Image (spheres, rainbow, N blue to C red):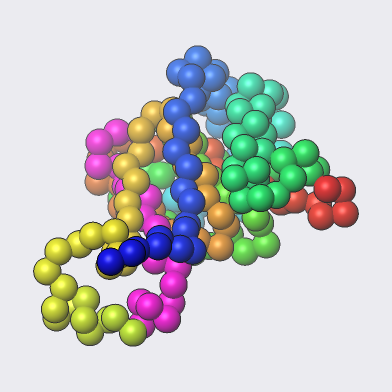
Amino acid sequence: MIVDNLFPVPIATIMIEEEIIDNTMNKLKEFLMDENNKKYVSSRPDEGNLLTTYYADDKQDLLGKLNDKMLMAVINDEARQFLKLLGIDPECHVTITTWMQLNPPGSLFNKHEHFGALLSGVIYLDVADNCGDLTFFNPVPLKTQNLAYVNRVLKQDGNFYNFETVKFTPKKGKMIMFESYLQHAVGVNLSNKDRFAISFNIQVAPNEC
């Protein structure tokens, strides 16, 4: 039997230096303590009171607001490596959108994708055990629909060819990058600590490649 593994779905995991993560976390804490910045932070009751800067009018510049050039440089460098992996000119002009995701105990983030972006990702700044895994869903809808009965009734063992979801456990300093169409969700934060993360989208300007 010859088996070809075709149509791959790349998900990159990068560990960032602790010095860079701590620098971002300190800047973020200062940002949140400033009363003038409360207007940028929104609460999502439907997601267990998740706090985010995503819905701010100038959400695209959170790391800019923090003057965090070190973490932005990491995102930029890793994104260009990912673009090269996808066969896209890594010297293209890219726009990086960043925002905060603060998951208090009991919060989550339901299944969604980042429509309109090419790449997306998350960087974990401060996490605890059981603070909510990042779950990706099988992006092949016809396969998922066709095998719904088989997987529910007949499947015995999970393996590379029959998975419906795959989970990544948060870890301080871990960055996960993926193509933006890939649906994902964040599990419930079952710890007693807030989880801090920076999320990002990356768009490419085709006329500047």
Quadrant of the image occupied by residue 154: bottom left
Q: How far across and down, in percent of the image, does residue 99 sit?
A: 60, 43
Q: Nearer the viewer, residue 33 or 175?
A: 175
**Residue projecting furthest to the top:** 19
Decide if residue 94 is in sight here.
no
Q: Nearer the viewer, residue 151 or 3?
A: 3
State the extent of the magenta-drawn residues as a range: 127-145
**Residue projecting furthest to the right:** 207
Q: Is residue 207 magenta?
A: no
Q: Nearer the viewer, residue 119 or 41?
A: 119
Left or right: residue 145 versus residue 43 is: left
Decide if residue 178 is in sight here.
yes
Q: Is residue 149 above or below residue 197?
A: below
Left or right: residue 114 versus residue 96 is: left
> In the rendered image, which quarter contains the N terminus?
bottom left
Q: How far across and down, in percent of the image, does residue 125 sit?
A: 45, 30
Q: Residue at x 49, y 25 (%)?
A: 16
Q: How far across and down, in percent of the image, does residue 26 sit?
A: 52, 20
Tally of numbered discs = 0
Q: Residue at x 35, y 77 (%)?
A: 144
Q: Is residue 91 above or below residue 24?
A: below
Left or right: residue 84 versus residue 135 is: right
Q: How far across and down, in percent of the image, does residue 181 sit?
A: 56, 63
Q: Is residue 131 magenta?
A: yes
Q: Residue at x 67, y 62 (%)?
A: 116
Q: Residue at x 61, y 28 (%)?
A: 74
Quadrant of the image occupied by residue 143: bottom left
